Image (cartoon, rainbow, N blue to C red):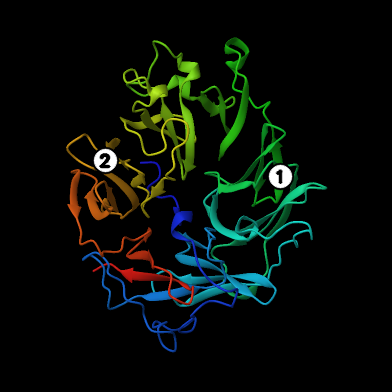
Amino acid sequence: MRGMGRAVTIMVAAAMLAACGDGADGGARGGDPGGSSPSAGASPQPVVKAPEGFDTAKGWHETVSWLPEDAKNLTVGAAAKAGIVAFLQKKGAGYVVEARDAVTGAPRWDSQEWQPPALPENVAPESSYLPQLLVVNEDGREYVVVWAYTPRFTEEDTVSLVAYPADSSGTEVAAAHTRTVPMDAYGPAKVVDGGNGLLVSWEEKGIDHAAAIDLSKDRVKTYDESVRLPYCEQTGCISGSVAGLSPDGPVVTLSPAGFGVPGVWQASDAVPPGADLKFVSKYENGRVFAVVGEQVFSLWNAEKGLTKQGGIPVAAVHDLKSGKLRTSVVCDPGGGLDGASHQPVLSPNGRYAVAGTIAVDFEKGKSYCFGGDGEQESVRLLSVDDDGTAYGYGQGGDADVPVTVAVGTGKIEELPQETQIPFLSLPGIGGFSLPAATNGERQFAFLPRR
């Protein structure tokens, strides 16, 4: 089965990373590279009200304290194949990556200090201009990337970045790649793991632009709205943009709809059941909302329900390399047809995925919808373990209720209101983002499964 043996990177949702701080150096780094008990000499282990499947008496933790109160920047990333959790920490006038063993918390490596370009004097500091961290998969290798967007206004804006192999070791590791991407952007740029490589995208004078950064060969290829699929000559596609990266080229999503990899595959050859082909042609249906791992997640107009007027779309998953339809379900993951608000997250072994109200079992080729049906409240899923246990919140009533969901059976179990839900899953470990302390510090705890 595709995806089972691939290194899976789990990213932390930005909404869970709003941190408070005054810019002081952060990080309680207990233990040493050869030790197995990182809590020695570290600050006390925070109290985590975790689900029963986690051992709250063990584990390790880390603190990030440099972000301003309103920031929602990504400062944590996990690389499953390398077995690390990476943190972006403030050091002196710059920033460093601290990579810790996902199981023990022992330091694996840290990077040299990196300073992003200074903001111009006429630009007010904003949290969106602060550096961010993400983990990128490219051709089976994982990289930890730190990047920052710098507006100029009087000249070209830039995205500056440095990349480190996730399986590095030692101290003051030098960046394997350093890159600056110039752009005349209308607003902050977007930097993501494109599925197979690093993708930078931005809007320039009303036109979508993108840059695919090949980390292994240290080269860049840029794209604008002229990207097309072969059938555009007959159907008259208005414009295109790059939504992800496959081993064989960019994943192009078209206006008004339709997607694929030019010259390799197109989604119109693998339309999911229930998609509207009566009023919307197969060439003008399907919009990519995320490319994660080896999968392309998309939303389609449905046969019934007048999706454009607020009905429920068909959510589908296609194979990134071949375009083959892997699974689909009638379901709105959140955000409607024009923009799902929940980034898909894979289980460490790649068998399962969750995206908002959707859960997927790739081994069985089945998708499940937890969007509510009048009798059952909607469930928003945030993470999923290798055994198909997903974690999230039931939405409705006066307050969201923490829940676990058995993906294979659809059974939903409500947890006590005070239960904290893991934001990421790694083999044998769950990661928890704790409420900000009174001093503004954001703590992250990593607990073993029982």
Q: Amino acid at mark 1?
A: Val
Numbered disc 2: secondary structure: loop
- Residue at 44%, 38% in the rendered image: 340
The residue where tag 1 is placed is 220
- Give above or below for 325 relative to 95: above
Task: Say which of marks 1 and 2 sits in front.
Answer: 2
From the viewer's perspective, tell me whether residue 73 is left or right of residue 449.
Answer: right
Q: Which residue is mark 2?
A: 370
**Residue for point 42% across, 44% down:** 342
Residue 325 position within the rendered picture, expressed as x and y whole percent measured from the top left:
39, 29
Q: Between 123 and 111, which is closer to the camera in this rendering?
A: 123
Left or right placement of residue 71 versus residue 181 in this view: left
Q: Is residue 429 above or below residue 369?
A: below
Counting from the top left corner in percent of width and height, residue 427 is at: 35, 62
Q: Which mark is residue 330?
A: none
| Total marks placed | 2
Q: Residues within 10 Å of mark 2 (few under 14, many from 20)?
A: many
The residue lying furthest to the front in this view is: 398
Query: Left or right of 89: which side holds 285?
Result: left
Q: Which percent across, then down, holds residue 174?
A: 68, 69
Judged from this view, the residue extending furthest toward the right is 154
